[in-house]
Image (spheres, helix red, strand yellow):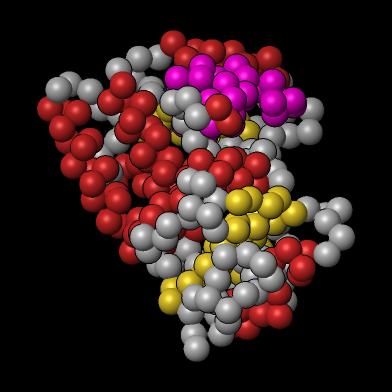
Amino acid sequence: MSAQLIDGIALSRHIRTDIAARVQTLKARGVTPGLAVILVGDDPASAVYVRNKVKACNETGMHSLLETYPASMTEAQLLDRVQALNQDPSIHGILVQLPLPPHMDAQKVIETISPDKDVDGFHVASAGALMTGLPGFWPCTPYGCMKMLESINYDLRGKHAVVIGRSNIVGKPMAMMLLHKNATVTICHSATTDLKAMTLQADVVVAAVGKRNVLTADMVKPGAVVLDVGMNRNDEGKLCGDVDFAGVREVAGYITPVPGGVGPMTITMLMVNTLESAEKK
Ligand code: GUN
């Protein structure tokens, strides 16, 4: 049996149509949602991500401001730019693309973004709000994963969800979101002694490690839902996730492809956060 695909491109298209309509409603009231994207340095992958974010903004009718700076920029200069954008009424979301050059303290930069413009959901205030169930911006990648589960009407109550990876950007917020929906959640990581024993119990697996073949067919319970957050290159240089897609799709009930799965959803949820930030004004 082959798993059903959860198509992140189709779902994104559907959500972005709704976003575009809401943007028009706001514009009619004189407000254009605006996203500022800051890229420091010349990491080629970051340049692609940033371009896609700006493009998505423009396609939904939002205002975007892309600022690119050389890696030689000082941290103080970057903090000045963030503070200026905090005060800019045409900007409702501020995104500083990570990673930053090594001479910068990324957390310090993130904490300088006003929490009400933190559309990445990385500020400690956003993380605290997610943990306590208070309103705040949710990080876009796990938020997109939740939308994918919603799209298949998956009821998480009482289900066992295993998250592989414990990053502040994906693993930890993912676990919190699953917990809010009453799943029993296990977070696995590099020190987990028997990953397979954990994933074999899982009704839902989220793979967010950044390494190929972290999840193979022998590690998956038949019928499980598998969400692949990974973005890697295989030996032929082709984009692939953390999951051995060809093998796992024969065991899982649902699976997200790479490319065309979680990636587009991350950008879509960034649009949602930016729109909602503008709607609050
Ligand atoms: N680098 C990789 N993913 C992300 C993301 O979602 N947001 C930001 N700001 N940087 C990233």
User: Residue 45: x, y in percent?
Assistant: 61, 52
User: Looking at the image, which residue sits at the far bottom?
Assistant: 1
Find the magenta span and give its range.
Answer: 104-130
Residue 151 occupies quadrant: bottom left
**Residue closest to the eye, 153 or 104:** 153
Q: Main secondary structure of the magenta part?
A: helix
Name above or below for residue 36 compared with residue 56: above
Q: Position of residue 264 (x, y in %)?
A: 44, 56
| Percent of width and height locating residue 126 | 54, 26
**56 left or right, relative to 141:** left
Residue drawn at 31 percent across, 25 percent down = 278
Asked whether the viewer can see residue 216, the reply is no
Q: Where is residue 239 shown, x and y percent of the image?
A: 60, 68
Check residue 116 for magenta coloring.
yes
Which corner quadrant holds the C terminus?
top left
Residue at far front of view: 158
Q: Quadrant of residue 190?
A: bottom right
**Which of the 4 image quadrants contains residue 207?**
bottom right
Q: Is residue 69 something that shows in the picture?
A: yes
Residue visible at 51% across and 17% down?
A: 114
60 with respect to 126 (left or right): left
For the point 38% across and 32% down, the residue is 274
